[in-house]
Amino acid sequence: MHELRRLLPTHESFHKALPFGLAAVDSHLAEGGLAGGALHEVVPAMQAAFPAALGFLTAFLARLFSPAPLVFVMPAYTRRRHGRLSGHGLHAFGLNPARLILIETAHRKDTLWAIAEALRSAAPAAVAGLIDRLDLKTSQKLHLAAGDAGLPLLLLRPAPTLEASAAATRWRVGAAEAARDRFGLYARPRWHLQLERARNGRSGEWVVEYDHVAHRFSLAAALADSAFSRGASDGVPGQNRQNLLQAGRS
Amino acid sequence: MASQAKTAKTSCKPVDPERPFALVVAGAGGPRIAALNEAAEAAGLAIGEPVADARAKADFLQLHAVDAAADDAALRRLALWATRYTPTASPLCGDYWSEDNGADGVFLDIEGASHLFGGEESLLADLAARLQRFGLAARLAVADTPGAAWAASRFHRSPLLVLPSGREAAVLADMPIAALRLPSETRSALRRLGFKTVGSLIDKPRAPFAARFAAELLRRLDQALGRVDEPLVPTVAPPVYHSLQYLIEPIDTATAVVARARRLMQNLVHVLLRDDAGARALRLCLYRVDGAVETIDIGLTAPTRSVDHVARLVELKLEALAAMEDAGFGFEAIGLAVTCAEPMPARQTEFTPAEAGDRAERCAALIDALRQRLGPSSVRRLAPVASHIPERAEILPPVDSTTSAWPEPAQPRPLLLLPQAEPAEDVMALIPEGPPRRFSWRGVTYEVEASQGPERIGAEWWHTSQRSAHSRASGNSCGSERQYALTRDYYLVEDLGGHRFWLYREGLYGRETAAARWFVQGLFA
């Protein structure tokens, strides 16, 4: 009985996948969503796309409905380079900032330790972190730790070249023109999403947008009307428009 | 009960201990001797003697000025070391140091602790032996009151004395007035009136003394005789619960220390359980063989009784501190004290499945561990502040502080805020109030595709210290004519690549400034 009880929660959480709620994206993933107890990498497509990558990661975290806190591990240098997470910005993203535990580390060693410690405790709902260098062995360790804890571990990897890693998925996120309402005002962020690697899944490419009120992802192509309306009124089609038209080609 | 150790004064410069040596303090009518060694005593010098006389009595007299701060620190260290006997150790220092009041000892409250050493006599013998090993000449006395112990340790023939209970008056009677810890004016006044010993004061009517002398005299007398209480001020706050272990073999490895700490915590858990309490703050004291004491403070986010958790925190702290590196000959005693306890109702842990309470506990444990290793300032949360100025609108308080609810954002707010607004160069915008069409930031030029704004945020004029970002960025701290920060117009702009920025123009054309400057403050996802 004792043994069963011990096994039960881990068994459950291990298989719990976290779907995007988008058939187009979820069908590319083996579990029908991001695996619960696994390592996932989010890579900015270029340096300027760092906020976009962070936004995608945050949107994913905001969709985890759980009273448990979220742990965010950031090395101290990123604050100077990219700025710090803003509570008002997070709140506008549909993520209650009070849920967040922010950890600032001085060394890479501390970053890895803090991530492993957060996973080991199994206290948070998810662990997110930023690591620039990550060798295969370390990524394997982190992946296993995430599996043991049954928690998703999302790592932001702002590195120009990436090594092989044990991550279950790797997402390359680029900036995309925002969705606007009919007055041309900023409504929802959009990202160019590229599923570069997926264990037991297929790679793909989409432009998705995120609705912070409904905590919902949707494909930008489906809302092409509102996207074009502003472009038409402007009369200046951006080069990004080409990307939008190709959206959802998957 | 109290015991008293008279520390030998030491100096940083090499001193020949065989020759007369004295410490000098400035006094009325020139420097006077404050402390001396045995050789000086043999030469006929005495404490309080003018240095000029002393020089005449002893050849090769070595003199040093008293370093009161070092004395104070040494005494505090000794008091900390003495907590191996009892948690309440109080050094006699702080207010003033002079040859009269002899602020040179330590009070130990050994009530309830002496039986652990087999009685007061054996505790005193143990203490004397250890102090001698450190090279300290000590005079010790045990008495019912701190005053009597103070007097006995200084004016009794025997350097090691246990004063029987109720015999204070009899023993003190023969002692000089100085045994009452009185200021020198009171002492000389009493001497002029013909009072030489404490005994001559004890049975006299009190009213004339109360009228003639400050309340000090009768208070000191009463304190010595136990008629009024004299509370001791301990060096470190006395713990709520305390567990101490003496080791037969000194230990010097982190693993051993952790194992001992675990054992001590197990002892404490019984007491904590009995009182339905949990530890919020703990202090681990490692008593080194050579008398130094390492203290490790452990703070906890939530009250705990978990032995594993405390052991792990000790382990993390030892790693971070590298306290083990200078363990010397090892630690001979180890003490764990609960310095702050909070009510913590007993909870059945065996049959309850993992639920909310359990998670909160794990979360607190995680925060404790992170803090212990990374430092308390590196684990934070976000909290809103009632301000419209974006860089003032939120703070990062420690994670266990309570925060107010976040207001619903009326306007878009960026996900990332730059630590400081950075100037945007080469901004092309319509004057006076147009959005930017092109700007450069960090060496990259962005063509603005769409913009939204302005959102006008006025300066908080009631903060005079709030300087404009302009004067900050240009390093022009004189800030010239402007006293207050300028009004800002915020724009959310998107470039051709879909990157979204939060820019603002500082200053209103014509009214506040002739040439407005642009700054990038945040990045939208």
Image (cartoon, rainbow, N blue to C red):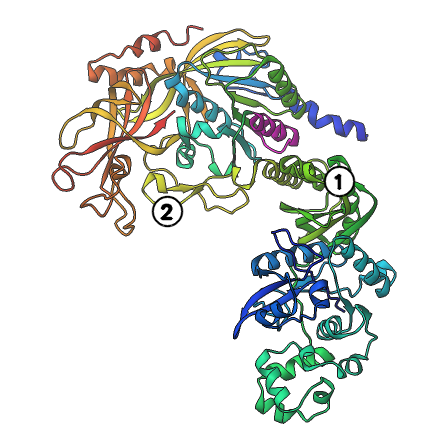
Give the x, y percent position of residue A80: 40, 29
Location of residue B373 by image quarter? top right
Give the x, y percent position of residue B2: 75, 68
Q: On the picture, is B418 further left or further right than B255? A: left
Q: On the picture, is B142 further left or further right than B217? A: right
- SS label for mark 2: loop
Is the residue B422 above or below the residue B270 in the image? above
| Res. A229 in view | yes
The disc at residue B257 is 1
Is the residue B270 above or below the residue B362 in the image? below
Residue type, label 2:
Ala
* Label 2 environment density (alpha carbons within 10 Å; few <14, some 14–19, many ≥20): few
Q: Nearer the viewer, residue B70 or A106?
A: B70
Labels 1 and 2 touching (C-beta < 8 A)? no
Q: Nearer the viewer, residue B447 or B122?
A: B122
Residue at the spot of label 2 = B386
Using the image, name the chain to which the residue with label 1 belongs: B
**The C terminus of chain B sits in image quarter:** top left
Residue type, label 1:
Val
Q: What stretch is highlighted in magenta?
A: A109-126
Is the residue A227 above or below the residue B44 in the image? above
